[in-house]
Structure formats: C-alpha cells, structure tokens
Image: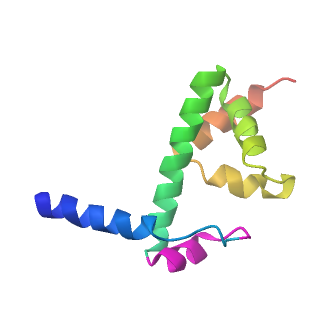
Amino acid sequence: MKNVIEAKRKIIKKKEDRDFTFIKKAMSGEEIAQFLNVKRQAVSNTLKRAMGKVYYRMKRLNNTKPFQTMVYMSLGFDILEGDMKNFYRLFPPKIRKEIKDDAKDFRF
C-alpha cells in the first residue's frame, strides 16, 4: 500500500511541474490524454468526477434546481451556446438525468 501511495505522489509531482499557461484553445479529451500521456478514458472519468463535484457544490451553495445549476456553471465556464450539448455530456449520467428531468418542468 505504501508503494502505491508513493507512486501516486510521484505522478502528481510530475504533473504539478508541467506549465499549462501556454494552452490557448479548447482541447478534446484525446488531445488532453496525449498531452498528459494518459488514456482518454482516464481524462473522461476525471472530468466527470470534477464536474459532479462542482455541480453539487454550486447547487448546494446557490440553493438552485439542477437545470439552473447547469446554466450557472455554463456561464461561469464561459460556455458558448453552440457548445452546450458537449458541456452537458461532461456531467455524469446521474446528474444528466437530474438536469433533463428538471428542464422538462423548468419555467422562466
């Protein structure tokens, strides 16, 4: 177990040493995976976990419904209207269902 923890620390340290400030455009999961030298599925899983964490924290802090939370997140991440479908797909399946069910009943 100690060896596994030590190996993970080395990986994290290696990734912390990378400078991401030069990235100027959006990247696909495949491009991110190549850049980080990991599998595309690892990128996808990490993004879904991160989106889930941000979603639940924003929902709790703002006391909003699922669809409203997604809209606030899209504004915060500066998601363009044409990219909303791809943004929606970044959420884990359970959250996508919550958003979809809430959007059916959403009233402005």
Considering depth in this image, is 17 or 3 the residue closer to the camera? 17
Considering depth in this image, is 107 or 29 the residue closer to the camera? 29
Range of magenta residues: 24-37
Q: Position of residue 22 (x, y in %)?
A: 66, 72
Residue at image point 57% right, 75% down: 30
Q: Residue furthest top?
A: 63
Q: Can residue 85 be spotted in the picture? A: yes
Considering depth in this image, is 104 or 58 the residue closer to the camera? 58
Residue at image point 59% right, 77% down: 31
Q: Is residue 88 left or right of residue 9?
A: right
Q: Can residue 92 be spotted in the picture? A: no
Which quarter of the picture shows residue 32? bottom right
41 in the magenta segment = no
Considering depth in this image, is 71 or 16 the residue closer to the camera? 16
Which quarter of the picture shows residue 63? top right
Determine whether 77 is above or below 63 in the image: below
